[in-house]
Image: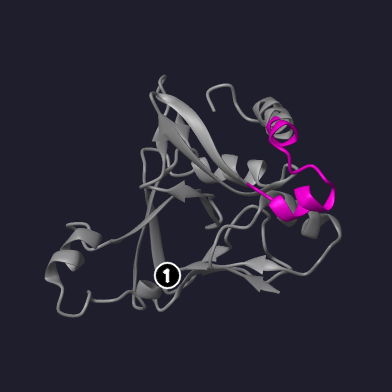
Amino acid sequence: MIIGGASMNPEVEEFFSRIKFPFTIGYGMTECAPLISYAPWDQFIPTSTGKILDIMEVRIDSEDPYHRVGEIQVRGENVMAGYFKNEEATKEVFTEDGWLRTGDLGTIDPKGNIYIRGRCKSMILGVSGQNIFPEEIEAKLNNLPFILESLVTERNKKLVALVYPDYEALDSLGLNKEESLQAIMDENRKNLNKIVASYE
């Protein structure tokens, strides 16, 4: 099974690996027609998005692309020349030296595997300068009981999670009362805070 299009839930990926399910994750975008990285399932490194394609060049806009997160930038024969009749958008998406800005943040390893951490636009800079990736917190939060969806954002220099409860599951157990829901979500908040970094 080949997976792509959105980030994979880490718990699901870990489960697939544990049961030796043959899967791989690819990474790409329409502007790259469409692949950037991929590895066959038997060569896939868990938590990566595969190996950089032979026809692609990838760089990380970071002082240390192996350890410090930066924007993933690409070039190659399958990268678009620009947006049709939209010079302004084309200029915005390419660096001055001709690399396409993906808008994704990540690292690469010495073997050419890409590891995506989040989107440039959604990264939050913590009060002590830490990079906080809301998608990683949301993935953990969405695996807690009775949470259907969540969105992590910053308000007044604090991280806040906006949560949409799984009302169907709550109804089926007779728990859809204001006080029950509040107690469940308070417990979820405590459990989440135990598994994320203190600055998160």
Question: Could you tell me residue 106's position as x and y percent?
Answer: 47, 48
**Magenta segment includes 168:** yes
Query: Could one spot residue 106 in this view of the protein?
Result: no
Per the image, the residue denoted by label 1 is 29
Question: Could you tell me residue 95's position as x and y percent?
Answer: 22, 57
Q: Residue at x 36, y 38 (%)?
A: 63
Q: Residue at x 23, y 76 (%)?
A: 81
**Magenta segment includes 170:** yes
Magenta part of the chain: 165-182
Classify 66 as above or below 78: above
SS label for mark 1 = loop
In the rendered structure, the answer to whether residue 88 lies left or right of residue 162 reads: left
Question: Looking at the magenta stretch, what is its main secondary structure?
Answer: helix
From this viewpoint, which residue is outermost toward the front? 177
Question: Could you tell me residue 94's position as x and y percent?
Answer: 23, 61
Q: Quadrant of the N terminus?
A: bottom right
* Pick the front one: 154 or 87: 154
**Which amino acid lies under the numbered mark 1 shown in the image of this protein?**
Met
Task: Find residue 144 and report its image quarter.
Answer: top right
In the rendered structure, the answer to whether residue 136 lies left or right of residue 176 reads: left
Q: Quadrant of the C terminus?
A: top right
Query: Could one spot residue 95 in this view of the protein?
Result: yes
Classify 133 as above or below 106: above
